[in-house]
Amino acid sequence: MTNQGPAERRAFGIDIGGTGMKAAVVDLDTGDLSTERHRIDTPKPATPAAMAEVVRELVAVHGWTGSVGCAFPAVVRNGVVGSAANIDDSWLDVDADAVFTDAIGAPVHMLNDADAAGVAEMRFGAGRGRDGVVMMLTFGTGIGSGLFVDGILVPNTELGHLELDGFDAEKRAAASAKKREDLSWTQWAERVERYLRHVEALFSPELFIVGGGASKQADRWLPKVSIGTEIVPAVMQNNAGIVGAALNAP
Ligand code: BGC
């Protein structure tokens, strides 16, 4: 851990994904990481007990003893997991806050991963100072959504699971679909555009922020997407989940 000035406010964030669990100490005033990011492969199967062990390890590696915020790729209502599209089914209805709090002996609070990324982008990134309806969308294994109204999060919107053309939308337009179906950037951008136009028609946001794995290469596909709403890539990229999680630490 690095030495920091006394004025710095810090918190610990963990971003849990299907393949990796990443953690760091976060400077809450700047949104910068105060330590190196540490990553451990998500255990297989990713059961609550196996993941709690990794959470314990991530906290120990950093010598962190305080509370922890956690971003999780599912619906999380008051700490309880409410969906399992891309995670192990054994998480359904589990009080994840309680499981991880038990594991580390300090309070843990979980929130949806796209909500966490959106919180970070609204505070420090592409959504900074933006009022009205702002929609964060993450394109990775699934599609995650974070809806903000005048900067306030409406949690667990799950817009990746809108039905579109008879499909669960994320099955066709997530970044994983590009890989799975070997689509060109142009072909994939067409799907993303179709999806965005649908979300646009339903919510009329003032701004879309697009994040997740695909935002690292936004220059390859974003220029091919033509919609009526302002759309910008996320600026915090890999760290948005960790930072948003830390901002929500109890
Ligand atoms: C899940 C969401 C999650 C998104 C991105 C979806 O399949 O249902 O909760 O935010 O993937 O990880």
Image: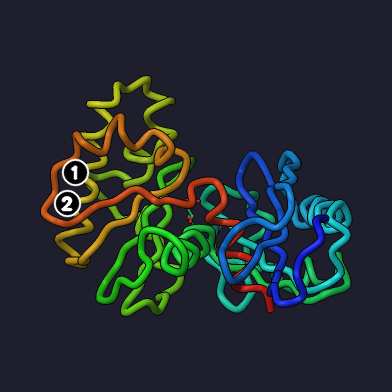
Q: Quadrant of residue 159?
A: bottom left
Q: In this view, does 94 lie above or below 223?
A: below
Counting other residues with Cα less than 10 Å from the Cα at mark 2, is it few (<14), some (14-19), or many (20 or more)? some
Query: Which element is circle 1 on?
Result: helix
Rendered location of residue 246, percent (x, y)? 64, 67
Outermost residue toward the left in this view: 228
Q: In this view, does 90 lie to the left or right of 239?
A: right
Q: What amino acid type is highlighted by mark number 1? A: Arg
Few, some or many C-alpha atoms within 10 Å of disc 1 (few <14, some 14-19, many ≥20)? Answer: some
The image's mark for residue 67 is: none
Residue 67 position in % (x across, y down):
77, 73
Q: Which residue is drawn at 14% across and 49% down?
A: 227
Q: What residue type is labelled 2?
A: Arg
Direction from residue 143 to residue 90 in the image, left or right: right
Task: Please state the horizontal and vertical placement of residue 126, each as a whole percent of the image.
Answer: 37, 58
Q: Residue at label 2? A: 197
Say which residue appears at 61% left-offset and 66% top-offset. Answer: 81
Comparing 20 with 83, the one in front is 20
